Image (cartoon, helix red, strand yellow):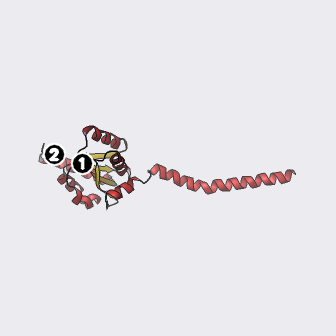
């Protein structure tokens, strides 16, 4: 079903808005995936804040023109699904996890920070822990010296208490 001019302009403006808010774009070829599997992928993406869209490639190229995602415009050919996410790693995680279980989904490219990523780059981006995990690790690192100091001071106080009692 073809779109008329106003519908095309609406799609372009919607994708332009998504691209302006997003940090990451992942492009994957979905040829041969069943509707049930695609529904599972969309539900997983929706729950993690990733917007997955099947778009006409010409409309997608026009929508990302002038944005940080323009660097992969040459990769926009064939049946593609576009994943935009505000979180830096969410889109890559969703698509890469689904690609592990479904070999028909082929990661084509991605963009993070205005730099084009190949399929391996998207998989490496997906392997980065989430923001919450990284913050927890940082807090653990900051707490470690303080807790060690408290243990040593407690041991010294206990040792002095024993010598004073004797």
Locate residue 23: give its quadrant: bottom left
Question: Local crowd at mark 1 within 10 Å, few (<14), some, or many (≥20)?
Answer: few
Q: Secondary structure at mark 1?
A: helix
Residue 161 percent coordinates (x, y): 81, 51
Between disc 1 and disc 2, whose residue precedes? 2
Q: Residue at position x 25%, y 40% from top?
A: 34
The image quadrant of residue 41 is top left
Quadrant where the N terminus is found in the figure: top left
Which residue, given by chain and number where applicable, does mark 2 sit on? 7
Q: Residue at x 64, y 53 (%)?
A: 147
**Is 76 left or right of 116, judged from the image as shown?**
left
As measured in the structure, the alpha-carbon distance from the residue carrying label 1 to the one carrying label 2 is: 11 Å
The secondary element bearing badge 2 is classed as: helix
What residue occupies the far top of the structure in this picture? 36
Q: Give the left or right position of residue 143, taking residue 4 as reference.
A: right
Image coordinates of residue 166 in percent, x first then y, are 87, 51
Residue sticking out furthest to the right: 166
Residue 32 x/y as whole percent = 23, 44
**Which of the two residues, 160 or 77, is positioned nearer the viewer here?**
77
Query: Count the marks: how many?
Result: 2
Nearest the eye: 120 or 89? 120
Residue 6 numbered tag? none
Few, some or many residues within 10 Å of mark 2 (<14, 14–19, 20+) = few
Q: Which residue is found at the position 60% from the left and 55% from the top?
A: 144
Q: Quick check: marks 1 and 2 in contact, CB under 8 Å? A: no
Residue 94 located left or right of residue 163 = left
Q: Residue at x 24, y 48 (%)?
A: 14
Q: Position of residue 62 (x, y in %)?
A: 19, 56
Q: Which residue is mark 1?
A: 14
């Amino acid at each position: 079903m073809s779109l008329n001019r106003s519908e095309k302009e609406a799609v372009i403006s919607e994708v332009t808005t998504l691209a302006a808010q997003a940090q990451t774009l992942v492009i994957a070829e979905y040829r041969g995936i069943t509707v049930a599997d695609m529904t599972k992928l969309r539900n997983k993406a929706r729950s993690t804040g990733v917007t997955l869209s099947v778009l006409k490639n010409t409309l997608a190229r026009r929508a990302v023109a002038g944005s940080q995602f323009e660097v992969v415009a040459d990769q926009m050919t064939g049946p593609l699904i576009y994943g935009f996410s505000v979180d830096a790693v969410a889109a890559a995680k969703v698509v890469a996890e689904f690609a592990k279980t479904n070999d028909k989904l082929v990661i084509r490219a991605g963009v993070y920070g205005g730099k084009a990523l190949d399929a391996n780059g998207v998989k490496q981006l997906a392997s980065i822990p989430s923001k919450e995990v990284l913050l927890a690790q940082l807090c653990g690192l900051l707490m470690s010296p303080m807790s060690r100091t408290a243990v040593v001071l407690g041991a010294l106080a206990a040792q002095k208490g024993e010598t004073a009692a004797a």
